């Protein structure tokens, strides 16, 4: 797809099929441009530039809605697309917080931390803090709940790997 302009809502793009017979226009809204904060779309894109974006859906009037941030880091996108719900993955706990646990997953692109476990998905037991179940540096296995290219995150559950009760 090619950037054809900018407006107050974001970036306007034109998609052309391989045979160049049918062109459709779409929009990349500001919050779908990049994983980092961008004040102006022209910081990332220029008119005529070829870009990659993922289709998110269609807005009320049928306008195509796209995400460039889902394709921003090709290695991350490939890693996330390879994750399926129910798949068992391994990793190392990177951080333990009141709201959940961050996990460096085996095979994730360098410099990124893609795994996250919400507190209710850590254990079947009631806990006051995730540190009752895991600690930073601990190796774990967990099941994939979702892998989301737009957020760059794999939501995990350790609870599914435990016997309930």
Image (cartoon, helix red, strand yellow):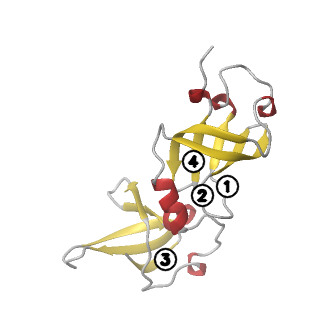
- Check disc 1 and report the residue beneath it: 113
Residue at 58%, 29% in the rendered image: 161
Going from N to C along the chain, the mark reached first, 1 or 3, is 3
Within 10 angstroms of label 4, few (less than 14), some, or many (20 or more) residues?
many
Q: CA distance from mark 1 to mark 3?
A: 32 Å
**Residues at badges 1 and 2 in contact (C-beta under 8 Å)?**
yes
Q: Nearer the viewer, residue 14 or 101?
A: 101
Residue at 55%, 68% in the rendered image: 73
Residue at 78%, 41% in the rendered image: 96
**Residues at badges 4 and 3 in contact (C-beta under 8 Å)?**
no
> What is the quadrant of the C terminus in the image?
top right
User: SS of the residue at dot 1?
Assistant: loop
Q: CA distance from mark 2 to mark 3?
A: 34 Å
Q: Of the residues tagged 2 and 3, which is closer to the observer?
A: 2
User: SS of the residue at dot 4?
Assistant: strand
Q: Of the residues tagged 1 and 3, which is closer to the observer?
A: 1
Q: Nearer the viewer, residue 48 or 118?
A: 118
Going from N to C along the chain, the mark reached first, 1 or 2, is 2
- Check disc 4 and report the residue beneath it: 154
Q: Position of residue 50 (x, y in %)?
A: 42, 81
Q: CA distance from mark 4 to mark 2?
A: 10 Å
- Check disc 3 and report the residue beneath it: 6
């Amino acid at each position: 797809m090619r950037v054809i302009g900018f407006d107050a809502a974001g970036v306007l793009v034109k998609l052309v099929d391989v045979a160049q017979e049918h062109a459709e226009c779409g929009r990349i809204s500001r919050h779908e441009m990049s994983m980092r904060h961008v004040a102006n779309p022209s910081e990332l894109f220029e008119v005529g530039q070829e870009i990659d974006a993922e289709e998110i859906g269609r807005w009320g009037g049928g306008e195509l809605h796209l995400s460039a941030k889902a394709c921003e880091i090709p290695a991350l996108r490939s890693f996330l697309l390879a994750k399926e719900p129910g798949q068992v993955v391994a990793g190392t706990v990177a951080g333990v917080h009141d709201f959940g646990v961050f996990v460096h997953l085996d095979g994730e692109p360098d410099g990124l931390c893609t795994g996250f476990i919400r507190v209710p998905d850590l254990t079947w037991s009631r806990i006051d803090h995730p540190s009752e179940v895991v600690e930073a540096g601990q190796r774990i296995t967990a099941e994939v709940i979702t892998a989301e290219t737009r957020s760059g995150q794999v939501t995990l559950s350790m609870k599914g790997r435990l016997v309930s009760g």
